[in-house]
Amino acid sequence: MEKGDFAIKTKKFVLPLLLLVIIIIILFYLGIYQKTCLDESCFEKALSKCSSAQYVKQRNNNLYVYTIFNSFKEDCNINIKLEKIAPGSDPDLVKLLEGKSMQCKIPKDILSSTYLDNLDNTLQYCHGELKEGILELIIKKMYTLIIENLDEIKKESKEFLKEV
């Protein structure tokens, strides 16, 4: 085998291998490859660094899927999906929230002090069907509370108006 033949064979092997490595790196940074976390500490470590990861968590018998996408900007992209509502839940609640997700762009400086259970406090950075469903649920509960306490509100309003 001549030197030229060896160089050609090496190029035929090295170039595709190099191309494959570059593609894998690009896919990783685009968030197509997600590290799967099996425990909360793994996910919280990824969350604090905003590195690509996915975690499935059961909370209040509801099944959530959290996915972090790599980001080079000052915000971290996180997808939160309520995969399955607790068995025996109100059918309206299931219809409103189950299978819905929201996309969040949370500033990285907030993430360093945020834990998985405190992600609810970051709702202001999110948009999507899950957020709309949560807000609709809050409005319905507030409306119910107001209707239940209408007599008390009316009574206190009259007292206030007498003082003014």
Image (tube, helix red, strand yellow):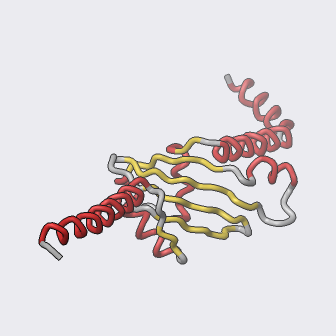
Residue 21 in the image: x percent, y percent? 33, 64
Q: Residue furthest left?
A: 3
Q: Vertically, is 122 above or below 38?
A: above
81 horizontally vs 78: left or right: right
Q: Quadrant of the N terminus?
A: bottom left
Residue found at x 76% / y 30%: 157
- 160 vs 94, nearest the viewer: 94
51 horizontally vs 140: left or right: left
The image quarter in which residue 144 lies: top right
Q: Quadrant of the C terminus?
A: top right
Q: Vertically, is 133 above or below 11?
A: above
Q: Vertically, is 34 above or below 142?
A: below
Residue 153 in the image: x percent, y percent? 79, 36
Give the tally of numbered discs: 0
Residue 108 in the image: x percent, y percent? 37, 53
Residue found at x 33% / y 46%: 73
Residue found at x 82% / y 34%: 155
Q: Residue furthest front?
A: 1
Residue 42 in the image: x percent, y percent? 46, 74
Q: Vertically, is 106 above or below 158?
A: below
The image quarter in which residue 110 lies: bottom left
